[in-house]
Structures are given as structure tokens and as C-alpha cells.
Image: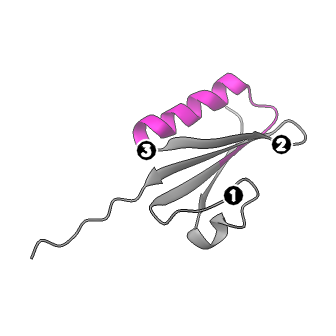
């Protein structure tokens, strides 16, 4: 498998992220950057694993200069209210 870099995006860094246009406090974000040498089918399979097991949804995919790819995933933050 090729090198895939994962980066959890904090709320303050989401607005400054080059592939993000807006941010929503209800979601947390994960950026996956894939090297150009990795096959697209392998990269899609890994993004699919994140979606299936981590409950992430694909928000944006970008092809970078040089052939690398960046996938931005998001998932809703579950906040539980106290009952007593």
C-alpha cells in the first residue's frame, strides 16, 4: 500500500484549509492526502473503509498538482444531553 496521510482538522484550521470553503460546528473533518504513486482504486477502497467503519462521509475530493489526491471527509459530532 502507498502512503496516505491523515490529518484531523480542528475548527480553527478548517476555515484556513485550502479545500474548505465554510465550516460547520456540527461536524468534525478529516483530510486524507494520497501520494501520486498510489492507484486510484486503492485510494477509493481506503476512503470507503473510513466511511464504513468510522461513519465518515465524503465531502470533497481534489486532484492536486503533481498527481496527488486529497479527500476531505466529515462526520456529525454526537452531543449527548444530561438526563438528570
Q: Residue furthest bottom?
A: 84
Residue found 43% across the figure and 35% down from its top: 52
**Depth check: 22 or 39 in front?**
22
Q: Which residue is mark 2?
A: 64
Q: Are marks 2 and 1 in contact (CB under 8 Å)?
A: no
Q: Residue furthest left?
A: 84
Q: Which label sits on residue 2?
A: none
76 horizontally vs 46: left or right: left
| Label 2 neighbour load within 10 Å: few <14, some 14-19, many 20+ | few
Q: Is residue 48 magenta?
A: yes
Total marks drawn?
A: 3
x, y (%) of residue 6?
Answer: 63, 51
Q: Secondary structure at mark 2?
A: loop
Q: Which of the two discs, 3 and 2, labels the residue nearer the N terminus?
A: 3
Of labels 2 and 1, the one closer to you: 1
x, y (%) of residue 24?
Answer: 52, 62
Q: Which residue is mark 1?
A: 21
Residue found 72% across the figure and 61% down from its top: 17
Q: Which of the two discs, 2 and 1, labels the residue nearer the N terminus?
A: 1
Q: Which of the two discs, 1 and 3, labels the residue nearer the N terminus?
A: 1
Of labels 1 and 3, the one closer to you: 1
Question: Gap between marks 2 and 1, in whole Å?
Answer: 17 Å
Q: Secondary structure at mark 3?
A: helix
Q: Secondary structure at mark 1?
A: loop
Q: Are marks 3 and 2 in contact (CB under 8 Å)?
A: no
Q: Which residue is mark 3?
A: 54
Q: Quadrant of the C terminus?
A: bottom left
Residue found 71% across the figure and 26% down from its top: 40
Question: Gap between marks 1 and 3, in whole Å?
Answer: 23 Å
Amino acid at each position: 500500500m502507498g502512503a496516505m496521510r491523515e490529518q484531523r482538522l480542528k475548527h480553527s484550521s478548517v476555515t484556513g484549509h485550502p479545500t474548505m470553503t465554510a465550516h460547520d460546528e456540527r461536524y468534525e473533518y478529516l483530510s486524507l492526502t494520497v501520494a501520486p504513486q498510489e492507484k486510484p482504486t486503492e485510494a477509493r477502497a481506503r476512503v470507503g473503509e473510513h466511511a464504513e467503519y468510522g461513519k465518515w462521509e465524503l465531502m470533497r475530493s481534489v486532484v492536486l498538482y503533481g498527481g496527488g489526491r486529497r479527500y476531505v471527509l466529515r462526520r456529525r459530532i454526537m452531543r449527548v444531553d444530561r438526563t438528570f
